[in-house]
Image: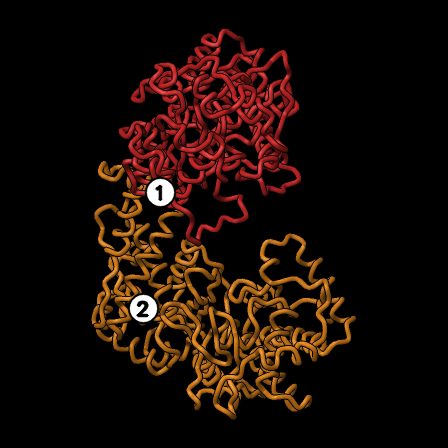
């Protein structure tokens, strides 16, 4: 993969965001991300086909038939294949694995891959309805007004009860602070302008209040409502030659995992993300490596508790110890294994259908030295990057292992 | 009759007006919320929205639709519980839509006063005209077989006079909302010696459910809010007239200057002349006329206001909430010109702004904008520093501001010594919550 591009993640937090003023629509984001990639790969003529990942444009933007927007990016994409994929918040990750499969099937050498979501078209209370479609609709009636925060609030509540409230909240506050500190280093991040001198203190002080929101999470435990898109080119070796990009400026996909859990059943254990565990291990196994060879992880922290549970699912900490692992700073940018180095879903933003692609772009940036101020040092003994993209409540998961080409 | 039973049939008179529409909204929402409680399932709640204007009532329904949606969006978590047994309502969107219907379904817009003949409670928010209020109340009282209670939103007419003249037998109370009722948290509650305790009890519960801050005012014309505002406004007019004659500058420029001092130097949400426009010069005139006969050793009257009225320049607001021109002409809500009573036309502020600002002199660097003080935690410290700096700065602006601050305090203290307010804290609460001042008039900043 190469030639990654991110638009700004627009929403609360960005100085230029004003909910009362008109904003760019999906066309703008698809075009910006698509053209951002095309510019780096010698134009549309080099693209064999395209994949576009999106969750709910039909409701956020009253727009379906999204593959039809691909030729809008560039006339050169006209009369070429394009497909739209959807798997809730894992739509971006699905776009990546779909592109990878096209390459593996040798039907294409260069796949333009885009993920996007434009969510600020409705107020949060209605956005919650739309995002709830990532769950089983038959459970919606009994669910919380803010359905997904409600689901992960239940997970956080179970974790507090099992492993202790104070220590968990410390881990969650540290997760938030890491997200903010990393986002401040990436100009496209939604929390780039955040100037709070003590994000950890702020998060630790704020207590969940079920009267205003959900029982076990605060708004700082949640990812952002975002408008944004990301794009990246997935290429075979032939494809790389065609676009004239050196291998060292690309990342190689070493392995990937992709698994789906039954959406109509409840998780067996609220304090475990079993699909993430399965798919991430599948990816590592497929790549023939272990987690201690991974230098950085981009995980799906739609809620801070999901970040902590992912740490456990990856086996970095035992069950019930993920919160301490995070609280000790081990996932920070200078810690043992830096997570979400451009802010993740809480700091960079969560344009739902775009997130999976954004994760791939961040790993590409970090492994090829293109991360700007957010750049971390990659230990040569641990040269791998890993992404985990989740749809719904641990229902659809894609996980990819990368290494610099 | 319980609280809920009494609320089952209510009328609001003047419900399409600025105050009436807000009162109607809050009452409709309160009635809808009561109707959703399990113990009230199946009971009918009726709220008659009575007004003389059909056009106004149509506008009212539009206003309600928009406002109820906003209210519903803020309490969807609670609404989901209330509609838990409605299998057909699944998404927040469905729930919010249903709630809007629940509220609107309670409201009966009508131009017929007869609708109030079946009500248990009548809210009145018609013009500030004592004879009209008395006429409406006595007509309802005569024709309504229930034990009907009257809530008047008058901001100036003594309640005991309404009681006596309409023959209400103590079943009346002053329940004075501030503009706009849906936003301002203050309610002045005015009972007379004759007001029945059960009426007071209901009023307190209703205010509590509406999350209002209650300040008790004695039954004296103008009560606390207008008792302060009218005198404060007249002081502003006097200051402008004085400035104009002493410095030999046009009154238009003086009005601009006093408005600027009262906003920027006194850290108020708007200058005093803009506030008079906001309230309406006509409304102010009505209120002064009501109050003046009751005050001793004071003449609550201004010939400038008389002139403005004669020239048809009245201020107030359009039904959209936009500001009408008054002392100032407004563009996008901001004053751009001042009315010249001699030329009978507006004079652009830009034409004298520099001269006027120079005359006032520099405002100390420690000045803060009113808006920035809303969430300020160390307000007192910031104000003390700024007003101390103001006292040290030898400018015309500072001199006028300090005199204004002192006069404002004097007015507040007189309201207590005249037994209109129980204590200075109550006056401060009224100015803080009803007028959104950043500090109460009774303070030590200007001593």
| Chain identifier, colour red | A
Residue at screen point 26% across, 51% down: B102
Comparing A212 with B44, the one in front is: A212
Comparing B236 with A35, the one in front is: A35
Residue at screen point 46% across, 11% down: A281
Colour in which chain B is drawn: orange
Q: Which mark is residue A126?
A: 1
Image coordinates for residue B316, horizontal then vertical, percent: 43, 76
- Subunit bearing disc 1: A
Task: Label 1, secondary structure: give it.
Answer: helix
Any part of residue A272 in sight = no
Any part of residue A52 in sight = yes
Residue B392 falls left or right of residue A261: right
Give the answer, above or below, for where A162 lies relative to B220.
Answer: above
Residue at screen point 47% across, 29% down: A41
Task: Label 2, secondary structure: give it.
Answer: loop
Which residue is disc 2 drawn over?
B15
Image coordinates for residue B439, horizontal then vertical, percent: 62, 64
Q: Residues within 10 Å of mark 2 (few under 14, many from 20)?
A: many
Residue B310 appears in which quarter of the rendering? Answer: bottom left
Image coordinates for residue A180, horizontal then vertical, percent: 59, 35
């Amino acid at each position: 993969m190469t030639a990654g591009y991110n638009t700004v993640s627009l929403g609360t937090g960005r100085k230029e965001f004003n909910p009362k003023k008109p904003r760019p629509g999906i066309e703008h984001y698809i075009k910006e991300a698509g053209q951002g990639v095309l510019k780096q790969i010698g134009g549309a003529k080099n693209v064999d086909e395209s994949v576009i990942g999106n969750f709910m444009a039909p409701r956020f933007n009253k727009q379906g038939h999204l593959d039809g927007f691909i030729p809008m990016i560039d006339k050169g994409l006209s009369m070429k294949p394009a497909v739209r994929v959807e798997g809730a918040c894992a739509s971006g990750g699905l776009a990546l694995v779909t592109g990878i499969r096209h390459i593996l099937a040798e039907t294409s050498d260069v796949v333009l891959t885009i993920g996007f979501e434009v969510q600020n078209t409705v107020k949060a209370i209605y956005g919650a309805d739309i995002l709830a479609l990532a769950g089983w609709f038959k459970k919606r009636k009994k669910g919380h007004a803010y359905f997904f925060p409600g689901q992960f609030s239940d997970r956080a509540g179970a974790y507090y009860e099992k492993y202790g409230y104070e220590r968990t909240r410390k881990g969650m506050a540290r997760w938030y602070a890491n997200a903010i500190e990393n986002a401040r280093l990436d100009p496209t991040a939604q929390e780039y302008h955040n100037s709070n001198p003590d994000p950890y203190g702020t998060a630790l002080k704020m207590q969940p209040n079920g009267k205003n929101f959900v029982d076990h999470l605060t708004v700082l435990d949640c990812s952002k409502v975002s408008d944004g898109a990301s794009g990246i080119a997935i290429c075979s070796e032939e494809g790389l030659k065609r676009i004239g990009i050196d291998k060292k400026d690309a990342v190689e996909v070493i392995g990937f995992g992709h698994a789906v859990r039954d959406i109509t059943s409840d998780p067996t254990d609220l304090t475990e993300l079993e699909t993430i565990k399965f798919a991430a291990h599948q990816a590592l196994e497929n790549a023939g490596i272990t987690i201690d060879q991974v230098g950085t992880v981009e995980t799906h922290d739609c809620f801070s508790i999901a970040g902590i549970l992912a740490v456990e699912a990856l086996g970095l900490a035992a069950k019930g110890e993920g919160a301490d692992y995070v609280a000790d700073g081990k996932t920070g940018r200078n810690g043992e294994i830096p997570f979400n180095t451009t802010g993740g879903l809480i700091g960079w933003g969560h344009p739902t259908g775009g997130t999976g692609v954004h994760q791939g772009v961040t790993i590409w940036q970090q492994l090829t030295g293109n991360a700007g101020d957010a750049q971390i040092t990659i230990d040569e003994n641990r040269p791998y990057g890993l992404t985990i993209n989740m749809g719904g409540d641990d229902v659809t998961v894609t996980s990819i292992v990368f290494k610099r080409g | 009759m319980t609280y809920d039973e009494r609320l089952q049939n209510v009328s609001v008179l003047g419900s399409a007006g600025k105050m009436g529409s807000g009162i109607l909204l809050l009452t409709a929402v309160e009635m809808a919320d009561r109707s959703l409680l399990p113990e009230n399932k199946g009971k009918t709640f009726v709220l008659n929205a009575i007004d003389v204007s059909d056009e106004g009532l149509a506008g009212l329904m539009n206003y309600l639709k928009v406002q109820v949606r906003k209210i519903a969006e803020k309490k969807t978590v609670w609404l989901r519980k209330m509609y838990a047994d409605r299998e057909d309502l699944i998404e927040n969107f469905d729930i919010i839509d249903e709630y809007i219907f629940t509220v609107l379904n309670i409201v009966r817009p009508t131009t017929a006063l007869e609708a109030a003949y079946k009500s248990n409670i009548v809210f009145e928010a018609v013009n500030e005209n004592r004879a009209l209020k008395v006429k409406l109340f006595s007509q309802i009282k005569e024709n309504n077989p229930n034990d009907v209670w009257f809530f008047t939103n008058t901001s100036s007419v003594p309640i005991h006079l309404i009681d006596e003249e309409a023959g209400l037998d103590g079943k009346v109370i002053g329940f004075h909302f501030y503009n706009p009722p849906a936003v301002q948290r203050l309610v002045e509650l005015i009972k007379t010696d004759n007001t029945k305790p059960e009426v007071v009890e209901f009023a307190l519960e209703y205010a509590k459910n509406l999350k209002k801050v209650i300040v008790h005012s004695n039954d004296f014309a103008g009560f606390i809010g207008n008792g302060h505002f009218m005198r404060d406004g007249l002081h502003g007019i006097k200051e402008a007239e004085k400035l104009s004659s002493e410095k030999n500058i046009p009154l238009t420029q003086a009005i601009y200057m006093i408005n600027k001092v009262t906003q920027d130097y006194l850290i108020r949400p708007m200058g005093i002349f803009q506030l008079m426009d906001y309230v309406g010069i006509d409304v102010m005139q009505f209120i002064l006329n009501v109050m003046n006969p009751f005050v001793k050793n004071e003449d609550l009257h201004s010939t400038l206001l008389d002139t403005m009225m004669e020239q048809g320049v009245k201020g107030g607001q359009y039904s959209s909430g936009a500001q009408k021109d008054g002392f100032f002409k407004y563009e996008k809500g901001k004053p751009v010109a001042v009315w010249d009573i001699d030329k009978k036309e507006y004079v652009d502020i830009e034409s004298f702004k520099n001269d006027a600002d120079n005359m006032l002199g520099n405002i100390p660097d420690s000045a803060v904008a009113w808006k920035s003080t809303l969430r300020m935690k160390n307000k007192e410290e910031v104000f003390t520093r700024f007003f101390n700096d103001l006292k040290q700065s030898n400018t015309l602006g500072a001199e006028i501001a300090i005199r204004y601050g002192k006069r404002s305090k004097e007015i507040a203290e007189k309201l207590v010594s005249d037994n209109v307010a129980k204590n200075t804290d109550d006056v401060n609460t009224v100015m803080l919550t009803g007028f959104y001042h950043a500090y109460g008039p009774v303070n030590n900043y200007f001593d």
